[in-house]
Amino acid sequence: MVRVLSISKASVSTGIRQLISWGAIKQVWGQGGRRDYYEANHNIAALIRRSYFDYIKPKLTAFGRSWSCSLQSLVKKGRWVLLHGKFPHGVKIESTNY
């Protein structure tokens, strides 16, 4: 892999560990030698679902909490006015400092 991809052994090792942690590949036994053999996970839907629940959703949730706290802080300081009802799916924010 090092020669084919033109990257260092450390980069290959790191990449393989990451792919294993995502469930994209798994180590399998191969006859002869001391080489490591890997098999790809062909269930793309399961990989996408797992990446969403393990990586994307927690980050979005954390961002939502942080965003909400920031908005509440700005409202308490009187720097922003929240105008409800401007958009059917959200809140419009406008500055009161004109």
Image (tube, grey):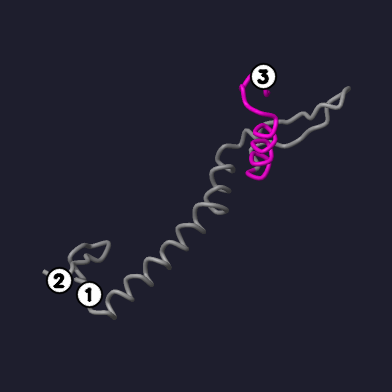
N-term mark: 1 or 2: 1
Q: Is residue 27 left or right of residue 72?
A: right
Quadrant where the N terminus lies?
top right
Q: Is residue 79 left or right of residue 7?
A: left
Gap between marks 1 and 2 measured at Cα = 7 Å
Gap between marks 3 and 1 measured at Cα = 58 Å
Circles 1 and 2, Cβ within 8 Å, touching? The answer is: yes
Residue at the spot of label 1: 79
N-term mark: 2 or 3: 3
Task: Provide residue 87's location: percent of width, then percent of height.
Answer: 21, 62
Residue at the spot of label 3: 3
Residue at the left extreme?
98
Q: Is residue 74 above or below residue 30?
A: below
N-term mark: 3 or 1: 3
Observer-nearest of 32 and 95: 95
Q: Residues within 10 Å of mark 2 (few under 14, many from 20)?
A: few
Residue at 63 percent of width and 44 percent of height: 22
Give the magenta part as a residue range: 1-22
The quadrant in which residue 37 appears is top right
Task: Provide residue 50's location: percent of width, then percent of height.
Answer: 58, 48
